[in-house]
Amino acid sequence: MCRTVPMKSKAQRRKFAELLVKGEISEEVYERWNKETGRKELPERVTPKPTMAKRRTAAAKKKTTTARKKATTARKSAKKR
């Protein structure tokens, strides 16, 4: 008999329930995993989803570029004096 692995997250529990409904796993397997997991409070996911880096809008890029140009111009004019 193979060793069963209990569910580690709520997302996993939902996925296996979906597989049970589709008929891809047997009810016995699902029940065995569910019993081994018990009534533990499971995390939503085992590993957090990767977050996307903040995207800079075109307006934000333009503001930054304009600010850099002004600073450079100010430095050049200060050197000339």
Image: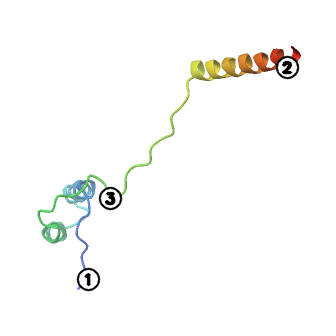
> For residue 43, which quarter of the picture?
bottom left
* In-image side of 31 versus 70 (left or right): left
- SS at mark 1? loop
Q: Position of residue 41 (x, y in %)?
A: 17, 58
Q: Residues within 10 Å of mark 2 (few under 14, many from 20)?
A: few
Mark 3 lies on residue = 46
Mark 1 lies on residue = 2
Q: Amino acid at mark 1?
A: Cys
> For residue 34, which quarter of the picture?
bottom left
Q: Nearer the viewer, residue 1 or 38?
A: 38
The CA distance from mark 1 to mark 2 is 78 Å
Screen quadrant of the N terminus: bottom left
Mark 2 lies on residue = 79
Q: Amino acid at mark 2?
A: Lys
Q: Position of residue 56 (x, y in %)?
A: 56, 28
> For residue 63, which quarter of the picture?
top right
Q: Nearer the viewer, residue 61 or 5?
A: 61
Residue visible at 51% across and 39% down in the picture: 53
Residue lying farthest to the front in this orientation: 81
Q: Is tag 1's residue or tag 2's residue first in the polypeptide sequence?
A: 1
Q: Amino acid at mark 3?
A: Val
- SS at mark 3? loop
The CA distance from mark 3 to mark 2 is 57 Å
Residue visible at 16% across and 72% down in the picture: 36
